[in-house]
Structures are given as C-alpha cells and as structure tokens.
Amino acid sequence: MTTIHQIETPALLLDRACMDRNIRRMQSQVDGLGCRLRPHVKTSKSWPVVQAQMQAGAGSITVSTLKEAEQFFGQGVRDILYAVALAPNKIDHALDLRARGCNLAVIVDSVASATAIAAACVARRVQLPTLVEVDSDGHRSGVRPGDPVLVEIGHALHAAGSLAGVMTHAGGSYDLDTPEALRSMAAQERDAVLACAAALRAAGLPCERVSVGSTPTALSATGLDGVTEVRAGVYVFFDLVMAGIGVCGVQDIALSVLTSVIGHQPAKGWIIVDAGWMAMSRDRGTAKQKVDHGYGAIGDSEGAPLPALWMSAANQEHGIVSLRDGSCPEDLADRYPIGTLLRVLPNHACATAAQYDAYRVVDGSTIVETWPRFSGW
C-alpha cells in the first residue's frame, strides 16, 4: 500500500478514524437535544465525507453555493438548504433545481430579495421555500429580533406561498473561549430565532422551520426546545480555531497538510517547507486567540505534536517554520534535514481544504483511499 513517504508534497491528509469520531459526537449531541442535524457541507465539498455524515443519521444538508447543491443533489441528496442570502440572478437556478426534484430551500434578509423571489414564484406558478435570516449576535447579516421588517418579509414571501421559517448563525461564538460564554451564546442564538418565529406567528404567518447553528453553539447548547434543526459544518474535521475556542482538542483535528523540509536559514532559526499560503490558505484565525499558531501548528510525519515549532510566516509556495522561543540552534538542519516530512494543522479547515482537489485518507502513515473534492460556485 502507498504511504505518505511515497507521495509528493504538499498533500491534504484526512484521518478517517478521527473524522468518524467527530461525526458521531455531533450527531449524538444534536440527537440528544431532540433536533435534526443538517450538516453544513461547505467544509468538505466531498461526497464520501457527506455520505459518512448521512450514514451517521443526518438526513439533510446545508450548502453555501448552488454548485454544492447541484453536486450533492446529483448524489441523491434531496433535502438541501442554501444558507447564503439568495441573489436575484440565482433565483432561476434555484427554481430549476426544485423543478428537477430537489427539495431546495433558500434564505433572505430583505424585503427586496423576498419580493424578487415571490415575483418569480408567481410568474412560474411554483413555490420556493424561503427562511428569513435572523441576526442573533450582530456578527454578520440577518434581521434583528424586534425589527418590523421581519413581518414585512414574511408577508412578501407568504403571498407566494414560500415562507418556510427562520434561521440564524451565531458566528459571534468564534470570538469566545469559555464553556460559560459558549452556553450563553447558544441560548442567545436560540432565543433570538424563537422570538422571530413567535413574531411571524403572531402576525398570522406560518413558521414551520426554526433553524440554528454553528459548531461552537451546537456543541454547547443545553436546551433547544422550539428549534427544529441544527446546522454545523467544521466539526467534521475541526481545526485550530475550534481548539482555541475550546470545543475540541488538537487531537480531534482530522485534517492536516503534509509538507517537506526544502531548506534552512540557520541564522534566522528558519526551517523552509514546501507548503506556503497556497497550501495552508491565508486564514490567520488564531491570531486573536490566546495561542497564535501563525499559519499552522506543526507535527511530525505521524502527526505527533511538535509544540516548540510553528509556521510563523508563509509566502506563496514557501512556509517558514520557526521555534516558538525565537532561538536559532546551530543544529537546526541536523534536527530537521532536507526531505523531513512534517504535518501542519490548519487554522481554518474550510479554507485549507479549499486549496486541494482531493483528500488522502490515512490510517497512520498509510494512505487507504483518495477522496475527490470540488471547488467553485
């Protein structure tokens, strides 16, 4: 069988056993909360990964692009939520997916978008289930609870039979790092979306679906009465940002980049590797956390952590690995000679995975499978 010592670098490695543990953990958590899990598949963009999530109990998915919807609908997934506010130039594509048998739902957070969807539905005499996005934490987009525009959007969609419910994403949870704060954010996320569901119902409008989700809040929630589904994505692989938040350990990160030592700058204390920001991405998500991992945390070829090292800088194809204490040992090249293999854990699994077209699925140092992934819109 092929081993990691026989392939070219950089390469994207996926620890299947670790991934499966992560999948089981999230499925068990959401099942215990009495909700349906709708994994966000933008993290993997790979059918074998999504298939493993569905075999564990998830019957539906969340996507971030209509290309993802097309790809996974082609694999037989029918229940799909496109969780980015629908641009008018994508309405026809969404309706075409519906016409082909995909149970696609979309989201909006403005009257203008809702009106455009309603007009298209009326013209084609069809329905496009649409959820109103709620801003539960001031993180990004959505309608704030209590804003009367929520009901306006609801009426616009309901006139075309397309109002399906409400949804939110507590992205602000990424700025937290204590169990107490995460539980509080999970409750805030839940309460915000339930308040909006109640407002729609009080206005005589239907609100069948109540959707929440982020990996940190999904794993921290203690009660989700009234919520129908939970969306989460990065949990399938985890990453250094999630470890910094405290919802996983470094040992739970299933994804790594295999890289080779290609040079040294002893006077600077640098080990040069062939994985730069094109291999790791430019994401510096740990920069504001208690432990800054630069462009990635370093492990040996088997994945055992080397906490004295970090990827301190990156050029397009060159990564600079340094000692965290800033020292410049004279024997650096002897410790890590040319050709040494290292594994780099990613700050943001979604961003790092996006640099590759396949996962090398590993069991230790053995490559057991290669799983394709796709990119683009």
Image: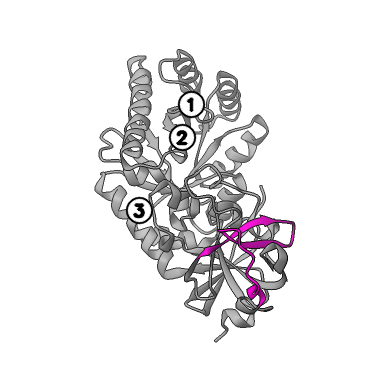
Give the number of the disc on residue 47.
Answer: none
- 196 on left or right of 356: left
Q: Secondary structure at mark 1?
A: loop
Q: Report the residue marked by disc 3.
A: 26
Q: Report the residue marked by disc 1.
A: 138
In the image, which residues are magenta? Answer: 307-333
| Disc 2 to disc 1, C-alpha distance | 7 Å
Q: Is residue 278 visible?
A: yes
Q: Report the residue marked by disc 2.
A: 172
Vertical order, 250 against 81 (above or below): below
User: Within 10 Å of the Cα at label 2, are there few (<14), some (14-19), or many (20+) other Cα atoms?
Assistant: some
Point out residue 344 in the picture as x, y percentages from the top left corner. Answer: 57, 64
Point out residue 309 in the picture as x, y percentages from the top left corner. Answer: 56, 63
Asked if the residue at tag 1 contacts the one at tag 2, i.e. Cβ–Cβ closer than 8 Å, the answer is yes
User: Between disc 2 and disc 1, whose residue precedes?
Assistant: 1
User: Between disc 2 and disc 3, whose residue precedes?
Assistant: 3
User: Between disc 3 and disc 1, whose residue precedes?
Assistant: 3
User: Residue at (31%, 48%) from the top-left corner?
Assistant: 30
Point out residue 120 in the picture as x, y percentages from the top left corner. Answer: 60, 27
- 273 on left or right of 2: right
